[in-house]
Amino acid sequence: MLIQLKNITKEYDNIGVITKVLRGVSLDVKEGEFLAIMGPSGSGKSTLMHIIGFLDRSTDGTYLFDNENIKGLNDDELAYIRNERIGFVFQSFNLLARTTVLDNVILPLTYSKKKNHKELATKALEAVGLGNRLSFLSNQISGGQKQRVAIARALVCDPKVIFADEPTGNLDSKSGATVMNILGRLNSEGRTIILVTHDRNVAEHADRIITIKDGSIIKDEKNLNKRKSEMIEDEDL
C-alpha cells in the first residue's frame, strides 16, 4: 500500500477557538491507483491533500507513506521526500512568468541528485505535448498550456504520486479535458494520481471517488464510468 491514513485529524487553534477541519479520516491508496477526492468548499478535501502531500501535518492520527511512518520525520526529511517522490499540480499553475517553459520544468531538479536536467525536462514536456514550446516564456502561452507545463514540472523528478488540486479550475472546458486526458494517460502508464475536485465530471476520470463532508469521508466508491484517455500530440505552432 502506497498511502495509509488512520484516524487523521486536523485542528486549528485561533486564539482559543478550535476549528476541526478533519475528523478521524482513514484512507488507503494503492500504488498505481487514480483517486478523486470530492467535496464542497470547506469540506476539508484540500487540507487532506496537503497532509498526504507533506505540505501540512495532522494534529493526530497515523500516516504511512510507502510503509514509512512519517510522524518521526523532521521538516528537511519531509521536504526531501516531497521533492523526490511527490509531484504537485495546482489550480493557479505557480509558474515563473518571465522564465522559459523549459526552465520552469527544470526548477524542481535544482536540489536533485539527478543529472541531465535539460534532457529530463524536455522529455517531461514532450510527454504533455509541449515539446515545441521549450523556449516560450510562460506568460506567452495559454492557460491550458500553463497547466500542462505544471504537469511536466510535477513529472520531472519521476515521482511515485502526483497530487492535482482543482487542476481544471481556471481552464475552459476544452483545456480542462486535455489536462484530465493527460493525467489519465499518466495513470494508465502506472503513475499514482490523487485528484481534488468539486466537479463530478472531472472526478469520473478516476478509478475511485471518495466524498468528504464536514471533515469526514461519507462515501468511498469504485467509479464504473471511468473516462478513457488518449495520446497527446505536440501542438502546432
Image (cartoon, grey):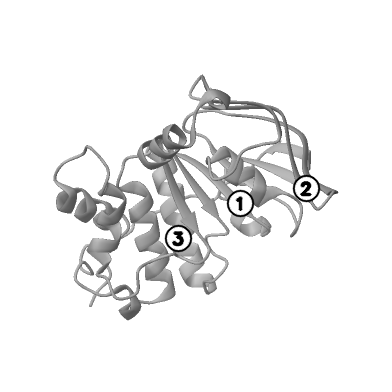
What kind of residue is marked 3? Val
In this orientation, does residue 204 appear?
no
Indicate which label's residue lies in the foreground, 3 or 1.
1
In front: 20, or 228? Answer: 20
**Percent x, y of residue 202:** 60, 57
Q: Name the residue under label 1.
A: 196
Residues at marks 3 and 1, CA–CA distance in whole angstroms: 14 Å
Q: Residue furthest right?
A: 17
Residue contact between numbered discs 3 and 2, judged by CB atoms under 8 Å: no
Q: Which label is found at residue 13?
A: 2
Q: Position of residue 120 (x, y in %)?
A: 20, 48
Q: Residue 5 carries which label?
A: none
Q: Upstream in the sequence, badge 1 or badge 2?
A: 2
Q: What whole-number distance in Å separates the C-alpha atoms at marks 1 and 2?
A: 25 Å
Near mark 3 (Cα within 10 A), the count class, few <14, some 14-19 or many ≥20, is many
Mark 2, secondary structure of its residue? strand
The residue closer to the viewer here, 135 or 231, is 135
Residue hosting label 3: 179
Label 1: how many residues lie within 10 Å, few (<14), some (14-19) or many (20+)?
A: many
Residue at the limit of the structure toward the top, as seen here? 67
What residue type is disc 1 on?
Answer: Val
Residue at the spot 68% in from the left edge and 49% down from the top edge: 45
Q: Earlier in the sequence, mark 3 or mark 1?
A: 3
Give the quadrant of the C terminus: bottom left
- Vertical relation: 90 (above or below) 157: below
Q: Nearer the viewer, residue 29 or 34?
A: 29
| Separation of marks 3 and 2 at Cα, in angstroms | 37 Å
